[in-house]
Amino acid sequence: RIQILFEMINNITLVINDTRTTLPWNTFLHILESTPRTRALYESEDSAYVLTCASLVQLMQAGFLMIETGSVSRRVKVNGILLKIISGAALCSLLFYLFGYGIQSGKGNPVIGESGFAGQGYPLCRQSDEKVETCSSYQLSLMFYALTFAASTGTILSGAIAERTNFLSHCAISTYLSCWIYPVVSRWVWSPFGWASIYKTDSTRLFGTGAIDFAGASAVHMTGSLPALFLLPLLGPRKHRFSGDASSVRLPGQNNYFTSLGTMILWLSWYGFVCGRTLAISGRQAVVIARIAVNTTLSAAVSALFTVIIGLYKERRLDASNANNGILAGLVSIAGCCATVNQFSSIVVGVVSAVVYFSFSKALIKLKLDDVVDAVPIHFFCGIWGTLATAIFSQRQYIMEAFPHLKTEAEVPCGVIYSCDGLGTKLVAANLVYMLALLAWASFFTCLLVLPLWYFRVLHVDKVTRTEKEELAGTTTIKFDEDNVDDEEDEAIINQFEDIQLYEIYENTNTIDISPSSSKDNIGVGMVLTKRSSTCSHGSSNTKSQASPKNSLPSTSSANSSQRSSNSKSNASSYRIQPSKSKRDEL
């Protein structure tokens, strides 16, 4: 016979067979949580939570896809880019299940796992004392969550090297990154077997503290973007990227709506990315999850605002891309410390991330490294800052809540700005050593794959080739050509007029139709050449001849061109390409 009496707020009294026992609430709850029925209930709750967060992380693929397709230059056919991202994510998911998860989480040495391949054995399935192997729903949920992280790591690289890589080479690099480089470096910091991990249960942690990277500022974002540092110099810039004004501003993208919508999708998905790293919602993890969500929001919002302000001060213009990239910079920077810092520190992290992103974005332009989506400034350099911020601003109390296996304060570190018996300095050292090891590992194996691909000239995009012999045989060697324009005539016009600006509308100017087309497959081929600032006098008989380019361009009709020239109200010496009225209506 058990009777429960509530005496004090902090205590509970149990009367068992007329024997009175008083226990602290925490002790009583710990006893309840250790019962088999309660643990089964918690496991079901945690499985549902992890699956929900993993689904949000999977949605990040849509965000990356929209940002990349919206950022590539207008003359690119995006079909190859879409297939590249989708195929890469699918291939990474399959191979990570077969090999990557075992390397990351399986039993083995502190560097590489040696079990759990293809869903067999630990950690997916565990043996009981009776040698019966059971595979729990919670372990399967963790595997799915880890799989979505690996796929996201491979997709980070895609945007940086867009428009220039061969389809098969890109798939090879992305899969190699997600299923070999990433599983190893993430094991080091997240697995209880990893040599730098704070999750180790013994006293052999690195410098006595272990490295802290809660949600992957370095393990995911630095790893995913580091290969771009080697690929960008090898691939070179896109055509026209560093000619004229393109050295100070980006090439016109496909669709700014796509980039902004993709950014908002990533922001939403990020809550699954960082909140899910608690790997549970039961027990006392709810307060940690709430803190993660608030810190993540503050860092992203502040970073976006400060990036816009810096862009306005430096460039004298308001740019939506600065706001989008500022959001992503703040999200990446807070990932490492989202569970271990307070709200004020998260705001500081966001402010610094805006400066880091903007500075290194301009540095890449000065070096003429063409990063289409600014993946290197956002993910690599902000990832470095996020890992350092973890060792600077983390609080001991929050670390204990985020890592519940740490039982005593003597083994819990804190940020270097707080006093915790010298453990703050050791945490800085542990994070620095881990980052250096990550850079060495990822750099070596990136070069091991990328340099042979570059040397044998299979890294770059090739034109679509189809020989007469292949046509007769019914076979074709096709490689995605992401650098093709939609119309060869448009490319010729672009080459002749270096200072063109596409799709700009000028009123009261002399216009000449230059690229009519009866093709119904491409709406945007109908263009108008706008002529401005000419020294010709109004109504001169030479207007028509001077309005034409040096190399004659096709026109809809010479009569229409002559009539427009004679009715000109402004003169021109430069040319602008813009859609004709009928084509604008169709667009």
Image (spheres, rainbow, N blue to C red):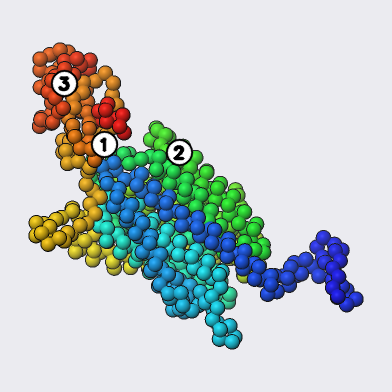
Q: In this view, does 532 lie to the left or right of 330?
A: left
> Helix, strand, or loop for circle 3?
helix
Residue 569 pos. (x, y %): 22, 15
Q: Distance between the residues labelled 2 and 1?
A: 35 Å
Residue assigned mark 1? 523
Residue 276, quarter of picture: bottom right
Give above or below for 289 relative to 311. Answer: below
Badge 1: how crowded within 10 Å, few (<14), some, or many (20+)?
Answer: some
Residue 336 pos. (x, y %): 51, 58
In front: label 2 or label 3 = 3
Badge 2: how crowded within 10 Å, few (<14), some, or many (20+)?
Answer: many
Residue 311, quarter of picture: top left
Residue assigned mark 3? 560
Q: Nearer the viewer, residue 298 or 163?
A: 163
Q: Is residue 494 left or right of residue 138?
A: left
Question: Given the current orientation, which residue lies at the most extreme right position?
Answer: 18
Q: Which of 565 and 308 is in front in this view?
A: 565
> Helix, strand, or loop for circle 2?
helix
Q: How far apart are marks 1 and 3 (CA)?
A: 22 Å
Amino acid type, label 2: Val
> Helix, strand, or loop for circle 1?
helix
Q: Distance between the residues labelled 2 and 3?
A: 46 Å
Residue at point 49% right, 44% down? 303
Amino acid type, label 3: Asn
Question: Given the current orientation, which residue lies at the most extreme top position?
Answer: 539
Residue at point 36% right, 48% down? 68
In front: label 2 or label 1 = 1
Image quadrant containing the C terminus = top left
Q: In this view, does 583 lie to the left or right of 192?
A: left
Residue assigned mark 2? 308
Residue 183 pos. (x, y %): 43, 68
Give above or below for 476 relative to 357. Answer: below
